[in-house]
Image (cartoon, rainbow, N blue to C red):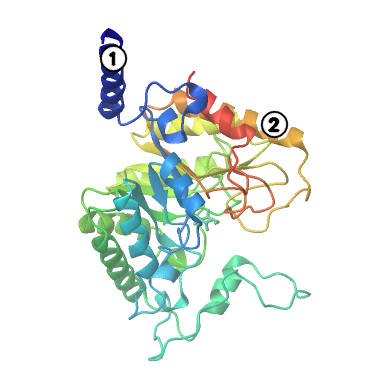
């Protein structure tokens, strides 16, 4: 009898611990899921459109992640392919599924120079919808011709006269208010502008790209976009998101220095900005001191920080740009050990700055559900087996 009572009491204690914290605190480190390991620190996220995921992959998403970023289906070209046509089908299913399963949603992305249909920038759009441009910039062009610059590719995609600043802004305002308004209260925040800073250039200026919104409207397009997003959902967190913006932080140069100039200007202009998304497309030799210093510098501006698209390639290069060096086809086991070390050091940095970090999102679900397919960049292999990097990330939460 006594032992039965003891069993009942122990059971109750476990049940209360689980419900009080929304997680099982009796688990050992080795048994924890990603979101359990970081429960009191920051949200853990993944990126996917969910469409086409297997049951096992969906279960993996439910098990490990607090929040999901749609990988593609909310990008301007996908969700608003023509001036008079939105396509919310995949995004709606994703948001419903996430909310039914207790997963939060992050919106990605409202303004961007890439994956944004030319109709946004054409003075006159044809009555009948034009075919979508090739998905990959430059795909289908003569491979022997010199590769045109991104500016040039964008200009070639525009048919006829360029829209005026007013027309382009009017379209952007409608786009932002429609998309943000549709998911108001259901999506916790948005990447308002993505990748505005060019890859090389003067680090004493914002060094914005010279085409797309920055050419047709000008630098104030960012401030306006933040204001419109805030009007559409005043409770949503609003982020500026970019890749390689940690680079140069220790020496206060490079893309990082430009990002500081840009963010200071947005704050001065009264943009309702909550934080900065450091994408985190990294590799085995990424400068981790820059990562830590960048987090500190953004926090010093009074901004929150998120790591929004994390992947660490186990071979070859990585960055937010397409077309990086892929590395060896067969990845030697020691690379996965090195990768685990890098992930561990990164999460130790994130833990040290957990007070300013809201979220760490992996860009994909597994090594085969990843835009860096073939470079073994994530925590789970193609069969969803946890890799050495998974264990390292869990262990870093105990420090
Ligand atoms: C950038 C974008 C993402 C995605 C990746 C590649 O980082 O922000 O939406 O396109 O490139 O998947």
Disc on the earlier residue, 2 or 1: 1
| Residue at the far top in the pictured view | 2
User: Is ligand 1 less than 8 Å from the beta carbon at label 1?
Assistant: no
Tell me whether circle 2 and circle 1 mark residues in contact (CB < 8 Å).
no
Q: Residues within 10 Å of mark 1 (few under 14, many from 20)?
A: few
Quadrant for residue 21, please give it.
top left
| Residue at the far front in the pictured view | 1
Residue at 75% x, 33% y is 334
Asked whether, in this view, residue 286 is left or right of residue 277, the answer is: right
| Residue at the far bottom in the pictured view | 127
Q: Is residue 115 above or below residue 351?
A: below
Camera-nearest label, 2 or 1: 1
Q: Nearer the viewer, residue 366 or 224?
A: 366
Residue at 39% x, 86% y is 124
Asked whether, in this view, residue 240 is left or right of residue 389, the answer is: left
Q: Which mark is residue 338?
A: 2
Residue at 32% x, 44% y is 267
Q: Which residue is mark 1?
A: 4
Quadrant for residue 37, please give it.
top left
Q: Element type at marker 1?
A: helix
Residue at 78% x, 39% y is 332
Quadrant for residue 180, please give it.
bottom left
Q: Position of residue 138 (x, y in %)?
A: 64, 72
Q: Element type at marker 2?
A: helix
Q: Nearer the viewer, residue 217 or 332?
A: 332
Q: Is residue 287 visible?
A: no
Asked whether, in this view, residue 205 is left or right of residue 79, the answer is: right
Q: Residues within 10 Å of mark 2 (few under 14, many from 20)?
A: some
Question: In what quadrant of the picture does the N terminus appear?
Answer: top left
Asked whether, in this view, residue 335 is left or right of residue 239, the answer is: right
Q: Position of residue 50 (x, y in %)?
A: 45, 58
State the separation of the CA atoms marked 2 and 1.
49 Å
């Amino acid at each position: 009898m006594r032992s039965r009572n003891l069993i009942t009491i122990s059971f109750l204690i476990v049940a209360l611990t689980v419900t009080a914290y929304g997680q099982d605190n009796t688990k050992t480190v080795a048994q924890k899921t990603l979101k359990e390991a970081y429960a009191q620190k920051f949200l853990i996220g993944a990126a996917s459109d969910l469409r086409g995921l297997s049951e096992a992959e969906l279960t993996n998403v439910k098990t490990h992640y607090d929040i999901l970023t749609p990988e593609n289906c909310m990008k301007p070209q996908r969700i608003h392919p023509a001036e008079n046509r939105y396509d919310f089908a995949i995004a709606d299913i994703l948001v419903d599924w996430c909310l039914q399963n207790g997963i939060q949603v992050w919106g990605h992305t409202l303004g961007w120079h890439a994956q944004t249909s030319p109709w946004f920038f054409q003075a006159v759009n044809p009555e009948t919808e034009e075919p979508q441009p090739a998905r990959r910039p430059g795909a289908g062009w003569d491979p022997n011709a010199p590769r045109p610059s991104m500016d040039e590719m964008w200009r070639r995609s525009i048919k006829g006269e360029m829209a005026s600043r007013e027309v382009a802004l009017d379209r952007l305002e409608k786009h932002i208010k429609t998309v943000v308004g549709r998911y108001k209260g259901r999506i916790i925040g948005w990447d308002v502008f993505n990748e505005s800073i060019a890859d090389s250039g003067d680090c004493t200026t914002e060094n914005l790209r010279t085409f797309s919104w920055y050419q047709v409207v000008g630098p104030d397009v960012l401030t306006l976009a933040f204001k419109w997003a805030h009007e559409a959902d005043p409770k949503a967190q609003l982020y500026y998101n970019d890749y390689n913006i940690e680079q140069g932080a220790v020496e206060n140069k490079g893309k990082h220095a430009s990002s500081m100039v840009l963010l200071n200007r947005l704050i001065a202009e009264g943009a309702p900005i909550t934080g900065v998304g450091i994408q985190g497309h990294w590799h085995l030799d990424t400068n981790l001191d820059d990562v830590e210093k960048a987090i500190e510098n953004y926090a010093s501006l009074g901004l929150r920080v998120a790591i929004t698209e994390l992947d660490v390639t186990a071979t070859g290069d990585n960055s937010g740009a397409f077309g990086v060096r892929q590395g060896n086809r067969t990845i030697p086991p020691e690379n996965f050990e090195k990768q685990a070390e890098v992930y561990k050091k990164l999460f130790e940095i994130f833990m040290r700055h957990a007070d300013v970090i809201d979220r760490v999102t992996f860009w994909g679900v597994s090594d085969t559900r990843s835009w860096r397919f073939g470079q073994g960049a994530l925590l789970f292999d193609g069969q969803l087996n946890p890799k050495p990097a998974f264990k390292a990330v869990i262990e870093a939460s105990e420090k």
